[in-house]
Image: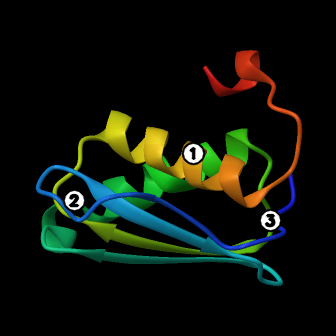
Amino acid sequence: MKIIKSAISGTLESSDLLVKIEPNHGLEIVINSDVNKQFGQQIRLVVEETLNRLNITDGLIIIDDKGALDCVIKARVQSAVLRATEAAINWSQIL
């Protein structure tokens, strides 16, 4: 899938995160989190795995985390990517 427009998903509520995606040459991931020292590496791993699964190789991904669980991170990244692309959704790939 290719990122063709800006999109956001999520909130800044506790236990959630806000994902912003914009078109970019190359893949750049920026993570802002109150728990970055403890869980920053795990958050990055979940984001990278989700993007790999969706075959995203270009885009600027900005994460504002407020203590979200891995399943929430994955869901928010998926929904932001789907909003930023116009590709047909293959639900078996997503689930």
- Along the horizontal axis of the image, is 21 left or right of 18? right
- Ranked by sequence position, the earlier of labels 3 and 2 is 3
Mark 1 or 2: in front is 1
Residue type marked 3: Ile
The structure residue drawn at horizontal position 46% and vertical position 41%, both measured from the top left corner, is: 74
Mark 3 or 2: in front is 3
Residue 79: assigned label: 1
> Taking 34 as reference, is 42 above or below it?
above
- Ranked by sequence position, the earlier of labels 1 and 2 is 2
Residue where numbered disc 2 is placed: 39
Residue type marked 2: Phe
| Residue 17, percent from left and from top | 30, 59
Residue 48: assigned label: none
Q: Residue furthest bottom?
A: 25
- Asked if residue 49 can be seen in this view, the reply is no
Residue where numbered disc 3 is placed: 3
> Taking 58 as reference, is 50 above or below it?
above
The residues tagged by marks 3 and 2 sit, at their Cα atoms, a distance apart of 27 Å
The residues tagged by marks 1 and 2 sit, at their Cα atoms, a distance apart of 22 Å
- Ranked by sequence position, the earlier of labels 3 and 1 is 3
- Asked if residue 92 can be seen in this view, the reply is yes
